[in-house]
């Protein structure tokens, strides 16, 4: 691959990650963290940049077989759960909703018209926008061989230029002073930042995107595992650098928003208010373009990866049929509403994230375990059990029985048991027989 191809691959990876949550969560977290922004941002960068980077490297290290040591049924169940969560259930529909809220709604005037379908009330403008958005997503996803060229070399440089301009204005024209931290950001900003990073879903996406990139490299004629690993790691570092740049600037925007953030329900509102105040209508149009491009490229990446996986899992159904199916489901789910979708997704993410983080960690320790297969299965089982406790607590269930556990109040009861199990597996278990 040429330097231009490598940069295109890195930009494409960055564009796949940079979507809805990446733009709406950092400003809101920055506003709530206020004077504790540095610690909150450091925690956020761990799970929103560091873990996705390590996840891509883990996929490269295992040549796309990060679940290879799990029982077939467990590996398939985990893969299906990940693909559904960051595909048609949560992440992909969210891209269309955020594109509507920030990229279209400010220019549509009265958006209160509702279409009553039985007991279901549908916002007409949101319905029409999401139908068009996911139709475009579907058309781009039907031709995955052109992703590297159309996304990596064309759309992403435009998106990156617009984001650089926005970041420069944030640093040069802060809206106000840092306020006092609020809620959990006052007590444990680092832990809260780590948990907030879950909402981007990027660690989950890194497993999907890593395998998708390896497949794209094969289609480009890069067949040697060593070459695939090298190019994937380069793309990972390019994407991580871009994400870190965006997050730092958006955190700063939220923390320095001052009166602009008063009454804001999410980071998208803060972002819109800042751009409108500083740049007026041209600025709002610029923001709309940034958000629309970011959400569209991410939606294409998610639908493509999901359709690719399920077409291999169920070979009787073609890739293109899955693209159409997932695009339709995304358009339907998107009309649930942004606030409802986020609230439903949080307990699910708190439950599944520990398992995926544990999976990435054991991938790097595979050669050091006494029995790698046993270690992978035990560590992920522990992460699943204790992650479920955190997830049920986040859903509002009474889990006070487990309140004695370290980090329970912070929503990370899974961490120490999983780490302890990982360490034990370095020393215990029957030595596996190496097969020739």
Image (cartoon, rainbow, N blue to C red):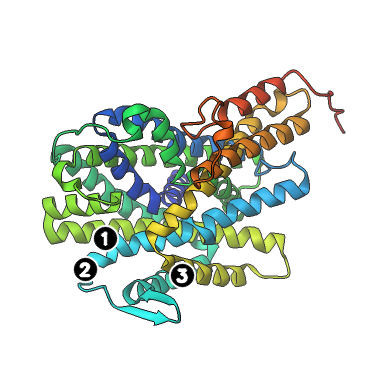
Q: Which mark is residue 206?
A: none
Separation (CA) of disc 1 from disc 2: 9 Å
Q: Earlier in the sequence, mark 3 or mark 2?
A: 2
Q: Estimate the x, y position of residue 202 in percent, counting from the top left.
A: 48, 45
Label 3: few (<14), some (14–19) or many (≥20) C-alpha neighbours in 10 Å: many
Quarter of the figure that contains the C terminus: top right
Which sits earlier in the primary sequence, circle 1 or circle 2? 2
Disc with the residue nearer the chain's start (3 vs 1)? 1
Asked if residue 367 is positioned above or below residue 239 in the image, the reply reads above
Identify the residue at horizontal 29%, vertical 49% (top origin): 267
* Depth order, front residue of 339/333: 339
Neighbourhood count class around disc 1 (C-alpha, 10 Å): few under 14, some 14–19, many 20 upward: many
| Residue topped by disc 3 | 331
The local crowd at label 2, few if under 14, some if 14 to 19, many if 20 or more residues have their Cα within 10 Å, is few
Tell me where residue 95 appears, x and y as whole percent. Answer: 41, 59
Q: Is residue 1 visible?
A: no
Residue 178 % position (x, y): 19, 33
Read off the residue under disc 1: 288
The residue carrying mark 2 is: 107
Q: CA distance from mark 3 to mark 1?
A: 20 Å
Q: Residue at x 29, y 31 (%)?
A: 37
Disc 3 or disc 1, which is closer to the eye?
3
Q: Are marks 1 and 2 in contact (CB under 8 Å)?
A: yes
Determine the secondary structure under disc 3: helix
x, y percent for residue 226: 63, 37
Q: CA distance from mark 3 to mark 2?
A: 21 Å
Q: In the image, 331: left or right of 339?
A: right
Image quadrant assignment for residue 175: top left
Of marks 1 and 2, the one in the foreground: 2
């Amino acid at each position: 691959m040429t330097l231009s191809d490598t940069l295109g691959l890195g930009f494409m990876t960055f564009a796949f990650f940079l979507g809805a949550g990446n733009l709406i969560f950092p400003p809101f977290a920055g506003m709530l963290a206020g004077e504790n922004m540095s610690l909150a941002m450091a925690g956020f960068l761990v799970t929103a940049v560091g873990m996705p980077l390590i996840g891509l490297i883990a996929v490269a290290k295992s040549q796309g077989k990060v679940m290879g040591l799990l029982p077939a049924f467990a590996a398939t169940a985990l893969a299906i759960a990940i693909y559904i969560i960051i595909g048609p259930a949560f992440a992909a529909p969210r891209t269309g909703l955020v594109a509507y809220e920030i990229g279209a709604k400010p220019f549509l005037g009265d958006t209160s018209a509702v279409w009553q379908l039985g007991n279901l009330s549908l916002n007409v403008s949101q319905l029409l926008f999401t139908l068009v958005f996911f139709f475009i997503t579907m058309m781009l996803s039907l031709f995955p061989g052109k992703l590297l060229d159309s996304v990596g070399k064309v759309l992403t440089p435009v998106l990156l230029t617009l984001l650089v301009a926005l970041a420069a204005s944030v640093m040069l024209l802060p809206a106000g002073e840092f306020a006092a931290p609020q809620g959990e950001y006052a007590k444990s900003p680092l832990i809260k930042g780590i948990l907030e990073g879950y909402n981007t879903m990027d660690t989950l996406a890194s497993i999907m995107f890593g395998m998708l990139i390896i497949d794209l490299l094969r289609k480009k004629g890069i067949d040697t595992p060593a070459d695939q690993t090298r190019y994937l790691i380069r793309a990972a570092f390019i994407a991580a650098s871009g994400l870190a740049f965006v997050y730092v600037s958006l955190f700063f925007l939220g923390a320095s928003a001052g009166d602009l953030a008063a009454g804001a329900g999410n980071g998208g509102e803060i972002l819109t208010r800042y751009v409108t105040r500083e740049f007026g209508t041209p600025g709002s149009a610029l923001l709309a373009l940034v958000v629309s491009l970011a959400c569209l490229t991410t939606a294409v990446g998610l639908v493509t990866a999901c359709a690719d996986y399920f077409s291999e899992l169920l070979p009787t159904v073609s890739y293109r049929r899955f693209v159409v199916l997932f695009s339709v489901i995304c358009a339907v789910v998107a009309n649930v509403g942004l606030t409802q979708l986020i609230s439903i997704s949080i307990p699910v993410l708190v439950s599944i994230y520990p398992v995926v983080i544990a999976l990435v960690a054991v991938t790097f320790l595979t050669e050091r375990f006494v029995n790698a297969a046993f270690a992978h299965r035990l560590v992920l089982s522990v992460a699943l059990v204790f992650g479920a406790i955190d997830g049920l607590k986040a859903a509002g269930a009474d889990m006070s029985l487990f309140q004695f556990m370290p980090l329970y109040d912070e929503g990370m009861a899974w961490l120490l048991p999983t780490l302890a199990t990982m360490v034990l597996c370095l020393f215990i278990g029957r030595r596996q027989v190496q097969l020739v």
